[in-house]
Amino acid sequence: MDLASIIGDQLARLLTEHVDRKTLAAAEAGAWSAPLWDAVAAFELPRALVAEEQGGHGLAWSDAGAVLHLAGRFAAPIPLGETMIAAALLAEAGIAVPDGAMTIADGRPLALTEGRLDGRLPAVAFGRSAGHLVTVTGPKDAARLCLVDLGMAETEPLASTGRDSRDDVVLRGIPPVATAPAGPGGAQRILVLGALMRASQIAGALRKLLELSVDYANTRQQFGRPIGRFQAIQQSLAQLAAEVAAAEVAAITGWRALDRDAARPDAAGFEAAVARIRSSEAARIGAAIAHQVHGAIGVTDEHMLHYFTRRLWLWRLEFGAESWWAEELGARVLAAGGDRLWPLLTRDDMP
């Protein structure tokens, strides 16, 4: 068994032990899930993407996608994906990776002037709970990766559909802890990584919706038999399964493209756009089907379903909504030209 499989098995057991309805309800009430984070940190998952010689596990991006799929499947209320990506970017740039939870933002509203950051980063995931933030700022041809101590920033809590922690982060003349050239892709790279992160989490949450819906359909009885025996319910569940598969394949393809082309400035941009659009579409369709199957019970606090569907609606909007990525995908296809459309869809070396 390879390292990625071992990590996946261990993480599944860890999340099973630490994440339940009580954990999710407490997190949505504003509590930091310290036992869950401590367990993940003890397993050294936050540095899973960092090279072994720098103190990490050296996982590939596609391995990280599998980890994030699991996090989405349990709706883990911690910034695991954000911290993994932040640590990888810092390590690549030669910046020391700090301990504790981190988060990421694309940094477009920020200005770096005379070594100080100014601006507002909207709706940052777990901004009030993370210790540091990684962002990219500056012009495209001279973008810089910045590590920010969130203890020096202002955070303004927001109400979100998913009820996960989201905060506006306000920086007023704050010196970054460290900066370095952003490397291939600049700010676009954080958008790509964030989009793929959310695509994997969406796919994981959809997988959980399918499990919950199948279980409910097989146990809920109507007219003397389980509702799962009715053709209409079977058709809905089959459609939900198809959406789950489509989201999973799209996310996996995006991470594999990143593994292949990580050094290119536009690495996985095409695949990230496809993954973001397809997973978001699957989230919209899948959430509707799951609630139709469950009926009224799916929106009650006592049931687990809404903890996943609400996060699906939130994750669809982050790191570029599907409409933004649809424009990005269209621009890439138009720039390539009509004779490149089929190769873009079928070749292994898609740009």
Image: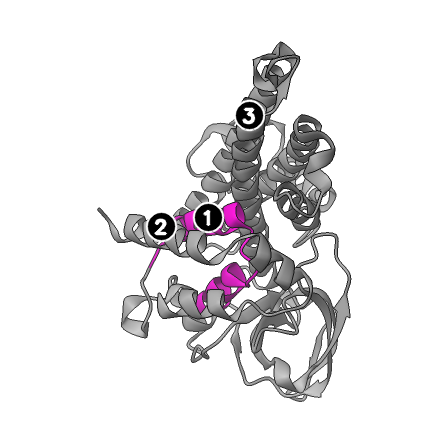
Dot 2: element: helix
Q: Label 3 belongs to which residue?
A: 219
Q: Nearer the viewer, residue 91 or 69?
A: 69
Residue 118 in picture, x, y percent from top left: 73, 81
Residue lying at 64% horizontally and 37% vertically, measured from the top left: 283
Residue 3 shown left or right of residue 138 in the figure: left
Q: Nearer the viewer, mark 1 or mark 3?
A: 3
Q: Are marks 1 and 3 in contact (CB under 8 Å)?
A: no
Residue lying at 44% horizontally and 54% vertically, measured from the top left: 15
Classed neighbour count for the residue bearing mark 3: other residues with Cα under 10 Å, few (<14), some (14–19), many (≥20): few
The amino acid sitting under disc 3 is: Thr
Q: Are marks 3 and 2 in contact (CB under 8 Å)?
A: no
**Residues in magenta, as a range:** 59-88
**Image vertical order of residue 247 relative to residue 70, above or below:** above
Furthest-left residue in view? 1
- Residue 30 visible in this rendered orientation of the protein: yes
The disc label shown at residue 70, or none: 1
**Image vertical order of residue 240 relative to residue 188, above or below:** above
| Of callouts 3 and 2, the N-terminal one | 2
Classed neighbour count for the residue bearing mark 2: other residues with Cα under 10 Å, few (<14), some (14–19), many (≥20): some
Q: Label 2 belongs to which residue?
A: 8
- Residue 143 visible in this rendered orientation of the protein: no
The amino acid sitting under disc 1 is: Leu
Q: Nearer the viewer, mark 3 or mark 2?
A: 3
Q: Is 138 covered by the magenta stretch?
A: no
- The mark total stands at 3
Q: Are marks 2 and 1 in contact (CB under 8 Å)?
A: yes
**Image vertical order of residue 40 relative to residue 208, above or below:** below
Residue 157 shown left or right of residue 86 in the figure: right
